[in-house]
Every structure is written in C-alpha cells, then in structure tokens.
Image (tube, helix red, strand yellow):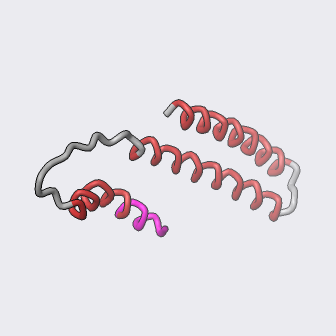
Amino acid sequence: MQIVHDLKNQLNGLKLYATFLRRRIEKSERPGDEQETVEKLINGLNRAAEDLSLIVRYGQPVELKKQAGVDVNKLLQGACGEVVVESSSEGI
C-alpha cells in the first residue's frame, strides 16, 4: 500500500498548487470560467484521493480457506456489500 500513499502525496501536492492558483485568480478578478475550471480541478483531485483511500480500505489481502458447504454467493455479498452500499449512496 506504499504506492497508494505515494500517489496520495502527489495528489496533495497538486491540490496545493491548484489552491495557490485559485487564490491568485480570485485576487486578480479573472473570468468566472477560469475560477470554475480550477474548482473542478481541486474537486477532481479530492475525488481521486478519496478513491485511493477506498482502495486502501478494501484492498487488503484475503486469506482463503477451504471449507465444506460454503455459499460463495453469500461470501461475496458479505465482502462486497459495504462497497456497493457506499458507492450507491454517493450517486455512482
């Protein structure tokens, strides 16, 4: 998961630069579409960081053990149920 941590650090650096740019645009009274573009950039960086956090949260290795009479469908619903509920509540 070190890779995800490194990617989040890079995203945070980009977000910092975008925030500085937004402040400069606001001070110079630039057109609204430029301000909107920077806001979209910052929001996209935030979403990417959230997605990486989700990968870390649910991307843990799973140890499989053979067991007689295991219902694979129920097993998958239990493992993925939270992810589906969480994603659908965000309008995805």
Q: Residue at x 24, y 64 (%)?
A: 73
- Find out whether residue 89 is within the magenta segment: yes
- Res. 24 image quadrant: top right
In this picture, residue 23 sits left or right of residue 7: right
- Res. 37 image quadrant: bottom right
Magenta-colored segment: predominant secondary structure: helix
The percent coordinates of residue 91 (x first, y second) are 47, 69
Q: Residue at x 75, y 61 (%)?
A: 36
Q: Is residue 52 above or below residue 72?
A: above
In this picture, residue 13 sits left or right of residue 73: right
In this picture, residue 82 sits left or right of residue 43: left
Instruction: Kindly give the residue lying farthest to the left in the view shown.
Output: 69
Range shown magenta = 85-92
The percent coordinates of residue 62 (x first, y second) are 32, 42
Q: Is residue 2 above or below residue 80?
A: above
Q: Residue at x 42, y 44 (%)?
A: 59
Q: How many labels were placed on the picture?
A: 0
- Find out whether residue 47 is within the magenta segment: no
The one of 14 and 71 positioned closer to us in this rendering? 71
The percent coordinates of residue 26 (x first, y second) are 80, 51
The one of 24 and 40 positioned closer to us in this rendering? 40
The one of 67 and 13 positioned closer to us in this rendering? 67
The percent coordinates of residue 58 (x first, y second) are 39, 46
